[in-house]
Image: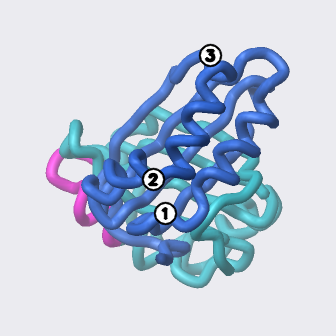
Chain colours: A cyan, B blue
Amino acid sequence: MYGLIGQMLATPGKRDDLLKLLSDGTADMPGCLSYVLATDPGNPDAIWITEVWTDKAAHSASLALPAVQAAIAKARPMLAGFPHRFETSPTGGHGLSI
Amino acid sequence: MYGLIGQMLATPGKRDDLLKLLSDGTADMPGCLSYVLATDPGNPDAIWITEVWTDKAAHSASLALPAVQAAIAKARPMLAGFPHRFETSPTGGHGLSI
């Protein structure tokens, strides 16, 4: 499996719009076993995204999906940065489902 | 919902033993919506744990479960540190299940 843990910063006041865009644009992605969006209690502009994919290729392929492309295009002006990005190799656990 | 993202370091050579302990000790935790264990491609001693709970109280209560207490006791001598720990407020996504 292939995993990503990332923190994204929205431009001021745009966090919830960005969260909605990400939520709407990332349903039904083939090979996605888990995709969790979260706010950050310590930073009103931050979003955490934790992802688990069957493999790295499935994640790469998702970036070409029309819904994902559309979400990325709309999200770009609301993005202020990516302070944290970690790649992981998930080994198992609870809550992984296609 | 309540979320935790953490990176844990094992003492040298103990990562896989620690991973097995964490995996065995954390099945069937009430209120746990997601619990994913992962290795770190950039650090052979590191483990990432991403967790989603119904609320903070469910996470706190899990620490008192006999299986979790037993895992913590066995894990302690294999732990070298916790370089990253982030609390989050998950808002939704894919792969959250009781």
Q: Which residue is mark 3?
A: B80
Give residue B29's mark.
1
Q: Is residue A22 above or below residue B41?
A: below
Q: Crowdedness of circle 1 by 10 Å Cα count: few (<14), some, many (20+)?
A: many
Q: Which residues are magenta?
A: A10-20
> Sequence order check: which comes first, mark 3 or mark 1?
1
Residue A82 location in percent, x, y? 45, 38
Q: Crowdedness of circle 3 by 10 Å Cα count: few (<14), some, many (20+)?
A: some
Report how far apart the C-alphas of labels 2 and 3 lie in the structure: 23 Å
The C terminus of chain A: image quadrant: bottom right
The N terminus of chain A: image quadrant: bottom right
Amino acid type, mark 1: Met
- Residue placed at 49% from the left, 77% from the top? B97
Tell me the element at label 2.
loop
Q: CB of mark 2 within 8 Å of CB of mark 1? A: yes
> Sequence order check: which comes first, mark 2 or mark 3?
2
- Residue placed at 48% from the left, 27% from the top? B84
Query: Which chain is mark 1 on?
Result: B
Q: Which residue is mark 2?
A: B65
The quadrant in which residue A22 appears is bottom left
Query: Which chain is mark 3 on?
Result: B
